[in-house]
């Protein structure tokens, strides 16, 4: 599809959930001529890293009833599943409470995108660049996007929908192991669980939901060797238990939301729930509609204290596993096929006998050693853009077009996605959406937040362009 160069152009860099849904809204709602250019490299278009999963066992961690891609059409996903021939076998009554395979959700997103293209009005065009954007320059009142191979794209507005970045390598005494072919730094690629001797032991750095994806991926490959998961805290992942909505905490939580007050109120409610034999996670879920507001009201110091003292526990309570998967993981632990270790990796050295990993166990502060055949990094996405080795990010920082937010969790921007430069001056051309806004919003990761951002950013962009 060709673009009409006289018409305003919005370029979207990144074609995961955010880029996909932003394009869907623009395609459906632009009343005046508009060119959309969708630039994507890395993960599959529309599905992104999360929903292009290689295994049917990788499930959504949010119930189907809460995963509509549209904030104002809560039943959209449920209706799509019901109408879809391939999914007739799914029990319709159980569907709203189900944790569906993530790759089904990927097909949903792809279908939404293709439908939006089919139904788009003639005055809107969409074109694609399947290449990595490496630089953007503001020139002659426009943004010029550069690639190593593809021709430049010139746009009026550019949205960075670049998603989650692969994890950082934990520091070792000797970092040379990280260039080994038995080290898998990106846990989301299928190759992380492929072509491995099924009897070799495996070390997973990290202990979150991606660790579970890897364990499930290995088990699907009939892996027999023991799997270790090593992380500083070694918290056990919690299951999604069924409970009634718990409004008491949010009813009591009134501004100002200073950290000590929020924490003590939160603790009191968790205790109250537990004393009644109920799940403390109900309190975590109940506070979610206010999380962004509370985070934004905190000073930098309060945010730092939260990050240092509470973030890990918050993460455990917030990111839970569907019950069946949780049971599977518990059984693997009982069968001594999976060991969750609290400790810090010290060094990793490889020779012809295997990979020797030394770590300091948290329990006794003693040094231990294990020998494994593969190490997979599941320590979570690297948020600090100053540490990213991505040409686009490096170039935008050096041009002072973007900089890290004060918490170094993403890109500094206004809540509507307008990017701010180092002097905190709003950009005329650059916007962002998704996990890059974590520093500003804290909760800016999952579909329930991202679908709202995609809709409101599309409305803002169309308004800015005179609609
Ligand atoms: C494994 C995993 C599972 C998850 N499961 C859930 C879930 O069950 N429920 C839920 O609500 N949320 C889940 N999430 C949260 C998830 O982050 C969001 O739901 C959503 O997928 C994020 O989409 P995105 O478009 O922001 O990023 P991504 O899906 O990462 O897409 C970004 C795309 O941009 C591309 N890109 C980046 N830079 C460039 C560049 N310079 N040039 C060209 N292309 C570029 C990337 O390669 C990628 O294809 C999960 C996240 C992960 C990582």
Image: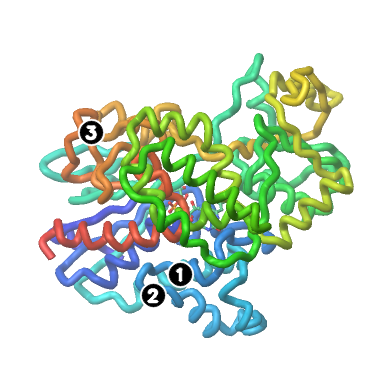
Relative placement, left or right, of 125 versus 68 is: left
Q: Which mark is residue 136?
A: none
Kindly tell me whether residue 128 is visible in this rendering: yes
Q: Is mark 2 within 8 Å of ligand 1?
A: no
Residue 113 percent across, percent down from the top left = 40, 69
The residue at the point 60 percent across, 57 percent down is 53
Relative placement, left or right, of 192 versus 13 is: right
Q: Earlier in the sequence, mark 3 or mark 2?
A: 2
Q: Earlier in the sequence, mark 3 or mark 1?
A: 1
Q: Nearer the viewer, residue 309 or 216?
A: 309
The residue at the point 33 percent across, 33 percent down is 299
Q: Is residue 76 above or below residue 199?
A: below
Question: Badge 1 is on which residue?
Answer: 68
Q: Nearer the viewer, residue 4 or 53?
A: 53
How many tags in the picture?
Answer: 3
Residue 141 percent across, percent down from the top left = 11, 43
Question: Badge 3 is on which residue?
Answer: 421
Q: Nearer the viewer, mark 3 or mark 1?
A: 1
Question: Badge 2 is on which residue?
Answer: 73
State the image quarter where residue 239 is shown.
bottom right
Kindly tell me whether residue 13 is visible in this rendering: no
């Amino acid at each position: 599809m060709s673009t009409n160069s006289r018409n305003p152009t919005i370029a979207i860099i990144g074609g995961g959930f955010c880029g996909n849904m932003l394009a869907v809204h623009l395609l459906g709602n632009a009343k005046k001529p508009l060119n959309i250019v969708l630039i994507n490299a890395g993960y599959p278009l529309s599905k992104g890293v999360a929903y292009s999963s290689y295994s049917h066992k990788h499930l959504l961690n949010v119930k189907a009833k809460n995963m509509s891609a549209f904030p104002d059409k809560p039943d959209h996903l449920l209706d799509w599943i019901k109408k879809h021939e391939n999914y007739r076998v799914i029990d319709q009554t159980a569907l709203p409470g189900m944790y569906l395979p993530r790759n089904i959700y990927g097909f949903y997103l792809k279908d939404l995108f293709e439908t939006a293209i089919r139904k788009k009005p003639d005055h809107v065009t969409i074109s694609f660049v399947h290449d990595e954007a490496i630089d953007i320059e503001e020139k002659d009142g426009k943004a010029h996007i550069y690639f190593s191979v593809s021709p430049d794209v010139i746009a009026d507005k550019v949205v960075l929908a670049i998603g989650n970045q692969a994890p950082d390598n934990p520091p070792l005494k000797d970092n040379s192991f990280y260039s080994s072919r038995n080290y898998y730094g990106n846990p989301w690629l299928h190759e992380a669980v492929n072509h491995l001797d099924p009897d070799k032991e495996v070390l997973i750095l990290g202990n979150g939901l991606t660790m579970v994806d890897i364990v499930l991926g290995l088990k699907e490959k009939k892996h027999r060797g023991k799997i270790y998961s090593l992380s500083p805290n070694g918290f056990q992942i919690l299951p999604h238990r069924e409970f009634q909505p718990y409004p008491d905490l949010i009813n009591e939580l009134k501004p100002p939301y200073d950290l000590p007050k929020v924490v003590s109120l939160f603790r009191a409610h968790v205790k109250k729930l537990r004393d009644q034999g109920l799940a403390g996670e109900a309190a975590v879920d109940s506070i979610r509609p206010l999380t962004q507001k509370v985070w934004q009201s905190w000073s930098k110091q309060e945010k730092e204290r939260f990050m240092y003292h509470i973030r890990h526990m918050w993460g455990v309570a917030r990111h839970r596993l569907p019950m069946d998967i949780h049971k599977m993981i518990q059984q693997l632990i009982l069968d001594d096929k999976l060991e969750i270790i609290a400790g810090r990796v010290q060094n990793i050295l490889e020779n012809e006998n295997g990979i020797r990993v030394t770590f300091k166990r948290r329990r006794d502060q003693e040094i231990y050693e294990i020998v494994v055949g593969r190490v997979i990094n599941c320590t979570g996405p690297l948020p600090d853009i100053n540490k990213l080795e991505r040409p686009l990010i490096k170039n935008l920082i050096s041009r002072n077009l973007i900089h890290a937010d004060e918490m170094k969790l993403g890109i500094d921007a206004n809540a509507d996605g307008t990017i701010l430069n180092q002097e905190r001056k709003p950009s005329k051309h650059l916007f962002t959406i998704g996990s890059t806004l974590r520093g500003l919003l804290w909760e800016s990761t999952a579909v329930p937040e991202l679908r709202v951002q995609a809709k409101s950013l599309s409305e803002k962009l169309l308004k800015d362009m005179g609609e």
